[in-house]
Image (cartoon, helix red, strand yellow):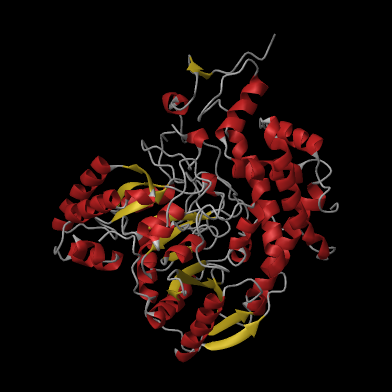
Amino acid sequence: MSELLDLNLVEASKALKNKEISSLELTKAYLKSISDTCSLGAYLEIVEDKAISMAKESDKKLIDGTARPLEGIPIGIKDMFCTKDIKTTASSKILENFIPTYESTVTQNLWNDGAVILGKLSCDEFAMGSSNETAAKGNVINPWLKNKKMSPGGSSGGSAAAVAARSALAATGTDTGGSIRQPAAFCGITGLKPTYGRCSRWGIVAFSSSLDQAGPLTRTVSDAALMLNSMAGYDQKDSTSANLKMPDLMDYLDKGIKGKKIGIPKEYTQDGISEDIVKFYEKSIDWLRDEGAEIIPVSLPHTKYALPAYYIIAPAEASSNLARYDGVRYGARQEASSLDEMYELTRGNGFGDEVKRRIMIGTYVLSSGYYDAYYLKAQKVRRLIKEDFENVYKKVDYILTPSTPTTSFELGKKQDPLTMYLNDIFTVPASLAGLPGISLPVGLDKSGLPIGIQLIANSFDEAGLISTARVLEMSAGFNFIADGAAK
Amino acid sequence: MPNKDTIVDVPTVNKIARLSRLDIPEGNKESLTNDLNNILGFVAQLDEVDTSNVEPLASVTGHKLPLRSDDVNDGNIEDLVLKNAPESSSGFFVVPKVIE
């Protein structure tokens, strides 16, 4: 069993194509992993029968030579993606019995390329959170230092925990302000948020439509490249989908970074960032320099205003998007004698506290008399943040930053919403600018928790992002496995 | 933006809750008001930024919304549309009575 779990996605794919292993045995190994690690709470729904039948289908294709790029690879899906005939709750009580009658474009792309579904992964409710603690069914536990019950990060906490615990070979996530990159950093894995528009949003439960973007959580950079190859693509059903062909990312793994310019923004080394993270950030800079990159200090002067702008824009869009949960067309309903009372009770009872806070903030900043002062102001600041990046990308090819100001924290320790928001301080700016970013593990801190470093590329340069991340990955040589991972 | 701490009071929170169609239990209103004030106080730092000649940015895509021909390309899926409805009848969603 263990040898099967030791294979990363690229290795497993090769072994499948060489007929050294079958998808059925690989899938069964992962189903066993899921049951061995069930105390982590990563999965909300396990679809064993479907997994087995998809694996058998893949084995046929592997034998008859018609294997597709992800043929027979067992993966987990964040519960924000609608999956036809499989319960999709967005970790919310209001959707606890929702069974979509259609499939999201991104997951359909993955099935079309031969991937096998294991189940649906927990996340913060409606992807609103940074610790996976807002999930209606309770938090997920980070497989690192498992006895201490650390947060896996959020919102894609179940996805990150499952990949780190080896109960999924890879997983999908969504990232609005850091929801792929921050949990990837906390769980010692790779998380890639593509350029806004790269992956279709169709069939993904909407949180903040101008920011939401799907991406992969994987063990390695090459695994992320292979996953994103399948997930990305133009989709007519999403009006913000980019009609731009993405090159085969696997061709860019070993391009190196000789002569590339890496920007080091001075605004990302502020007070409050952990010493160990600073140490590994400096090491990462040295590693890239040693591999032939030119290191250039840069400034993104509006960085400090990214988080406040985000906490106006994202709740504003959320308050509008979540208006659809009205107890009429789908989702839970609380019976009441009048329509308005039915709405209020349904929504009051169906949404958790963090979601309610964001709906309230969003409604307030969009309300008459406050729209200009908050919402419009935030959109103006968003432009300044985007222009900061545009100016810097005239001088450099990539930007290197820490992924998070701290490593994972104990569950239940951060109760104040604002303190929680500060987790995303390094990931939110790239989200507001729509830029692709990747977090990869580069080392462990004193207590043995993973440290993530983030690379940000210019729009639609996922290929260069992969080349650069791969260099950093090779230099860091991070090969630790979480103590809570399946053996 | 107004000063921190005094941005919203409980009556304002009641009004926002009503606009949001959210039932907030009486016992939670004070802590919710505090949370909202903390968050609104935090975002108020945007006031420091001079945005006098800046156009708001609503979309980062840079492309125009695509148009398609106005053809029916879907339909006849009444059962699927109603499948997740809490209550439906004769092809309609059912809501509590709205006319006296």
Instruction: Point out residue A240 in the picture as x, y percentages from the top left corner.
Output: 56, 53
The residue lying toward the viewer, choosing from A15 and A32, is A32
Query: Does residue A363 appear in this view?
Result: no
Instruction: Point out residue A146 in the picture as x, y percentages from the top left corner.
Output: 39, 59
Left or right side of A286 for A144: left
The residue lying toward the viewer, choosing from B77 and A116, is A116
Instruction: Point out residue A185 in the picture as x, y percentages from the top left corner.
Output: 47, 66
- The residue at the point 47 percent across, 64 percent down is A186
Left or right side of A214 for A265: right
- The residue at the point 50 percent across, 89 percent down is A289
The residue lying toward the viewer, choosing from A66 and A124, is A124
Query: Does residue A210 appear in this view?
Result: yes
Instruction: Point out residue A375 in the picture as x, y percentages from the top left corner.
Output: 75, 51
Number of dots carrying numbers? 0
Quarter of the figure that contains the C terminus of chain A: bottom left
Left or right side of A148 for A365: right
Image quadrant assignment for residue A66: bottom left
Q: Is residue B30 above or below residue A327?
A: below
Q: Is residue A51 above or below residue A483?
A: above
Query: Residue most toward the front?
Result: A147
Query: Residue most toward the top?
Result: B100
Image quadrant assignment for residue A211: bottom right
Quarter of the figure that contains the N terminus of chain A: bottom left
